[in-house]
Image (spheres, helix red, strand yellow):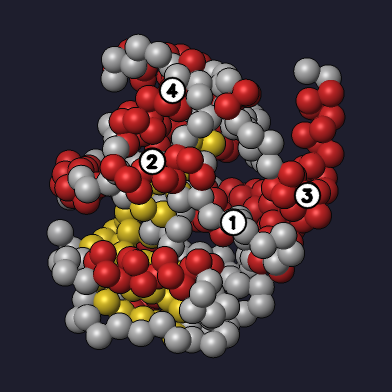
Amino acid sequence: MQISIISTVCYKNKNHFIYKRALELIEYFKNTNYEFIISDASKDKILTSNYPNIKIIQSKYQNPFSPAQARNEAIMYSSKKYILFYDIDLSNDNNFFIKLSNKIQQELETSIKKFILIPFVYLSQTGTKEFETNKNLQILKNSYLDGSRKFVENIGLNGVVMIINKEYLKNIGLFNINFQGHGGEDLELVHRLIANNPHSKKPDDYYINETSNVVANLKGFRKYMAYYTLPLFFEDLFLVHRWHDRPLFDNFYFKKSNNQDLLVSKMKEYDSKNKNIWKAEKEFDFDSYLKNLCKKYNIQNSIGLYSYDKNNKKSNFKSKLRKLITRPKEFFKDIKIRKYK
């Protein structure tokens, strides 16, 4: 299968988690038929590779790091028909690329779809150890669906992890480099893709930009985008985000609040400037969609899609403090919601 896999990195030194993870992925992909491109946006670039299918792109250093800029530079160096965006802190099970190739043959090669959005799960520290030991997705998925948060803290149903025809991506437009730092650039691109390939009418609440750790409670564009990814989760075609510590003070994360506002602004701007989009008449009933998916995939226990056992989810003081520092509006909104529940 003609696939260029693109990852971006911005590390501080050889002891940094991101640098070590890049070395792991180089070793993983070195003997494959895939083209693996790492766009290195670090200030002091020390990452190298001598393998013929591995490309290290010396992309522009920016502070804060711009994933959009780094990905766009890598796209220009890609030589394969399809591009897979694969974040550096993700991992896959042993059958992932077999299942992905089958999905490409079924949906992209037949032109049934123009892109495939791939879900992923955020693993806890315990879940990361569990996955690294046996790479068993069933244990992780069943634990999540049971309502436990011991192994899986949350599920990512909207993001940059996708497989797409390179020429179609260039036609839609690459990542918007107005986004710098954490978040926004991925969802802005996904918005353009689904606006041109909608599964149903754009709902009135589409521009609501709120996250939820309960799938059934998703709102706005995140609820709409979940249509594209949830079936793949049930088919075990998903990636895992390995737990890793994050610095409390990092300019990269301080941009997230601004990027969230910019995201909605860019979404509305794109929709207002392009008239030949959102061509769909069907209404989207998310609750019925969830129930029908569970029935289709014979999911016996789906409580984790509607609620979870809060006793299994440890409170992370550092995470809450980071959220207060970098995203104060979101932090106090969460406090207000919990107060009146």
Mark 1: amino acid: Asp
- Which residue is at a point 84% across and 23% down the rendered structure image? 339
Residue highlighted by disc 4:
145
C-alpha span from label 4 to label 3: 29 Å
Circles 2 and 1, Cβ within 8 Å, touching? The answer is: no
Quadrant where the image shows the C terminus: top right
Residue 292 placement (x, y as % from top left) = 37, 15
State the residue in front, 125 or 274. 125
The Cα atoms of the two marked residues, 2 and 4, are separated by 17 Å
Residue at the spot of label 2: 130
Q: Are marks 4 and 1 in contact (CB under 8 Å)?
A: no
> Which label is found at residue 321?
3
Query: Which numbered disc flags the more N-terminal residue, 3 or 2?
Result: 2
Residue 95 visible in image: yes
* Tag of residue 245: 1
Q: Mark 2, mark 4: which one is toward the viewer?
A: 2
Q: Amino acid at mark 3?
A: Leu
Quadrant of residue 144 in the image?
Answer: top left
Q: Is disc 2 placed on a helix, strand or loop?
A: helix
Q: Which label lies toward us, 4 or 1?
A: 1
Secondary element type, mark 4? helix
Q: Is residue 36 left or right of residue 261?
A: left
Residue drawn at x 21%, y 76% is 53
Gap between marks 3 and 2, in whole Å? 27 Å
Sequence-wise, the earlier of marks 4 and 3 is: 4
